[in-house]
Image (cartoon, coloured by chain):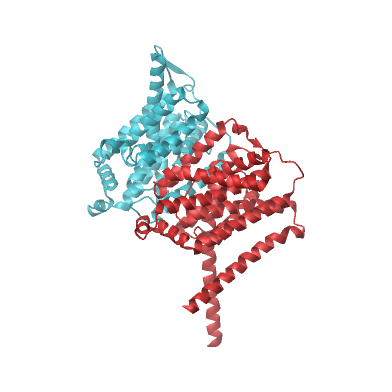
Amino acid sequence: MRAASTQMGRFLNYRVAGWGTLLIVLGILPWFGISSNLTRLLFTALVWIIASVAWNLLGGVTGQVSFGFAVFYGLGAYAAAMGINGGLHPLAAFTISGLVAALASIFIGLPTFRLRGPYFAIATIGVSEAVRVVMTNLSFTGGASGYRIAEHGRFRPLEHYYTALGFSAVAVVISAWIHESKFGLSLQAVREDEEAAADIGVNPLKAKLMVHLLAATLTGIAGGVYARYAAYIHPQGVFGFHTSVAILLMPIIGGAGTVAGPVIGGFVYGLVQEELVAAFPQFHLLLYGALLIVIILFEPRGVTGWLGRLRGFIERIWRKSATASVG
Amino acid sequence: MDAADFVNLLVSALLLAGIYAAMSVGMTIIYGVMKIVNLAHAGFLMLGAYYVLELHERLNIDPLVGSVLAFPVFLLAGMLVHWTLVKRIPVSDQPTLASLLLMFGLWLVLQNIGYLIWGSSDRSILTSRTLSSMHLGPITIPTVRVIVFIPAVCSLGLLEFVLRKTWYGRAVRALMQNRYAGRLAGIPVEKMARLTFGVGIGFAGAAGGLLAQLYSFSPDFGHGFLLRSFVIIVLGGLESFWGAAAGALVLALVETFSILVLPAGYQPAIAFSLLVLALVLLPGGIAGIFAKKHRWA
């Protein structure tokens, strides 16, 4: 028992050390004179990571695949935009983003969580499209022509960068905690078998609503952080179907149901996406679609699964050569 | 609103319902036999539209004939997709997320192949009948709607005949009702699934060709119609052929008559809201209201 707990402790320490190193590297990177373009790309990647980690809590850990996260991203973006225009401190505005998205998650979750699996997924497409149409026609948000944020003072890219870094660190900590906690176990139980989960005392609806709320809050904040940076948002962008698709593809490609997967997915998507769009306009999703097909057919754990296989392969070779040299 | 307006709206709703039924039937039949929610339906609708466009522009083939010609081509394409991709995911009695995401990935691929070949600008098919209309007293009907409505309904009638009277159709209906009993009765499930997937995709391609004569399209074409197809098959109780026809009628009526109470900008939201309402409130579809236990196949 004791051996197991120290082993667990060592395992945790390795992981904490790994994440800490990543955080420090990303934290001091801007001081080494990286180009403003790279800062911008990293900022984009970090915002996507917040949303990707959030989606994974609902889609990966709890198994409720949603095509509707653009709703939270967009509501968060608009809430922050209006808050900042109303003279609020950005952090207060981001809090409102989270609260608005959380509120929306309850209104969306209560009816749609009566549905299972693919039916839930389809219902979320309907919800997000309906919200997009309404936002396109709503007059006080500027309708289809979008909404502009007027923030006074100089534009400071590093402030945006560190805001995104801070929130994505919070998101990863929440995700890691959920993966270790009893709450996370109950979510996994819901994913594997709702009836069995209910039999052992988990309330599936409550568990789903809670994790939906948490994921929506984080996604709303991501939308808010993006909106403040972009200074201009419009319904076809933040509420667009492609936003939902991006938020769904990142964690699945990285590895759904893991802590590291969504972060890897977000980094890859954030950094590669722009280059792909610049090189092949309109064509970039071909690669992601093909990747999604390959992942569904061969490796449900995505990139983390491939990395795990690679590690197993290297370890086998290493062990073989070790025994060979001993023999 | 006077009586003539009402009849006008009613006629256009009925004509729309015919197209909607033809559009969603491919999805219904695939769902019924394989329990796969075919998100790639949108991609095949789009490809069907471009197929008819290319035939029309290059070979000067009438779009109606083109739509009919789309069926065999898309049937083979569907069988190929089943053979290469779909049969590799585990068979299940319930629709699975794996199959949903697989078809979604395929949709992304098809859509972007569309962008690669045809670019992102809107295209449309113009024929001599596109802008003409028929007058029956006070009622005005666009000719092209009627001309598209006829093959749509004929194809549905043909499918219904096949499902009722042929060995293939009886096998399909058996598999819709109970996959395992069907297997025990000697139905080659794998082969039937492949053929059915082909038929479903064939209908999608042909329906795409018909829709292309009514609306302009881009590689993102199927998106709105995919959601409408969902509404229809959910309203229809997911695996019932006549249910889907009834669902198409309900959606067409609601969409057409909503113009009286809602601003036109909000109109697309109707289908999506109806989808959520139907999923949550009517798990058995329209057919489920009338017959709780009895299944219409």
Q: Colour of chain B?
A: cyan
A37 relative to B205 in the view: left or right? right
Q: Position of residue A100 (x, y in %)?
A: 55, 43
Q: Which residue is depicted at the point 26% across and 49% down?
A: B178
Where residue A261 sits, quadrant-wise, is bottom right
A92 relative to B214 in the view: left or right? right
Chain given the colour red: A
Q: In the image, is residue B217 above or below residue A297?
A: above
Q: Which residue is depicted at the point 45% across and 62% down?
A: A185
A22 relative to A305 in the view: left or right? right
Q: Nearer the viewer, residue B260 or B126?
A: B260
Q: Nearer the viewer, residue B52 or B265?
A: B265
Q: Nearer the viewer, residue B2 or B92?
A: B2
Q: Position of residue A39 (x, y in %)?
A: 71, 53
Q: Nearer the viewer, residue B270 or A153?
A: A153
Q: Which residue is depicted at the point 62% across and 69% down?
A: A17
Q: Position of residue B24 (x, y in %)?
A: 39, 37
Where residue B151 sits, quadrant-wise, is top left
Q: Position of residue B194 (x, y in %)?
A: 36, 49
A90 relative to B249 in the view: left or right? right
Any part of residue B110 in sight: no
Any part of residue B179 in sight: yes
